Structure formats: structure tokens, C-alpha cells
Image (cartoon, rainbow, N blue to C red):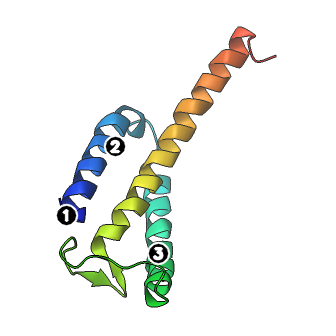
């Protein structure tokens, strides 16, 4: 299985599970978070690849690179940018419900 197939499967499951919460969130803060995380991925992945911290099997990637980072590596930034606001919203709502019920005291 290539990295692209694995990334697409994980992102599809993440989006399917997160969609009910994502519909209630404002779009631009989530998009902004994804853009910032992708920018950080370009910088730090390129540096880590250049110094040899990790390498990618050419048979497992498309070969498309942004500076030095393989395109598939950006799926992690997208997943984090989507999953964290969803988790923050869901877990924050649960904490408010517990506090309102008097359990959080």
C-alpha cells in the first residue's frame, strides 16, 4: 500500500467521523490552521529530510515534492488541522455538560 492510498483512507474516515461537528464550526479558522500547519510542514520536513532524520521509500510515494517534502506528508498536517478543532469542540462540550450537571465540582 502506498502512502497516498493510506493517507486518503485515513482522511476519508476522519472527515466522515468529523463532518457533523465540522458543519457547526466556522470554516476560516479551520482553513487557517490547516494552512499554517502545511507551511510548518514544508519548512520542518524539508529540514529533517535534508539532514537525514528520515527518508521516504521512492516506491511508496508519488515523487511530487514541495520544496523537499513529499506531497503525501501534508496529509498529517491536514488531519491535525481538522481533528484538533473537532476534538476541542467535542471535549469542551462534554466538560460543560458535566459542569452544568454538577459533576465537575
Q: Secondary structure at mark 3?
A: helix
Q: Which x, y percent locates residue 46?
A: 44, 84
Q: Which x, y percent locates residue 68?
A: 37, 86
Residue 93 sits in which quadrant?
Answer: top right
Picture quarter with the N terminus: bottom left
* Distance between mark 1 and mark 3 Cα atoms: 24 Å
Residue hosting label 1: 2
* Tag in front: 1 or 3: 1
Residue 57 sits in which quadrant?
Answer: bottom left
* Distance between mark 2 and mark 1 Cα atoms: 19 Å
Disc sitting over residue 39 in the figure: 3
**Badge 2 vs badge 1, beta-carbon distance below 8 Å:** no
Disc sitting over residue 55 in the figure: none
Q: Secondary structure at mark 2?
A: helix
Residue hosting label 2: 14
Q: Residue at x 43, y 70 (%)?
A: 38
Q: Which x, y percent locates residue 39?
A: 46, 75
Amino acid at each position: 500500500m502506498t502512502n497516498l492510498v493510506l493517507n486518503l483512507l485515513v482522511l476519508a474516515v476522519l472527515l466522515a467521523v468529523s463532518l457533523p461537528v465540522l458543519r457547526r464550526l466556522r470554516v476560516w479558522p479551520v482553513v487557517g490552521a490547516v494552512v499554517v500547519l502545511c507551511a510548518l510542514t514544508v519548512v520542518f520536513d524539508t529540514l529533517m529530510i535534508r539532514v537525514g532524520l528520515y527518508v521516504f521509500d521512492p516506491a511508496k510515494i508519488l515523487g511530487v515534492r514541495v520544496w523537499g517534502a513529499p506531497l503525501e506528508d501534508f496529509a498529517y498536517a491536514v488531519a491535525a488541522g481538522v481533528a484538533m478543532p473537532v476534538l476541542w469542540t467535542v471535549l469542551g462540550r462534554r466538560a460543560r455538560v458535566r459542569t452544568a450537571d454538577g459533576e465537575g465540582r
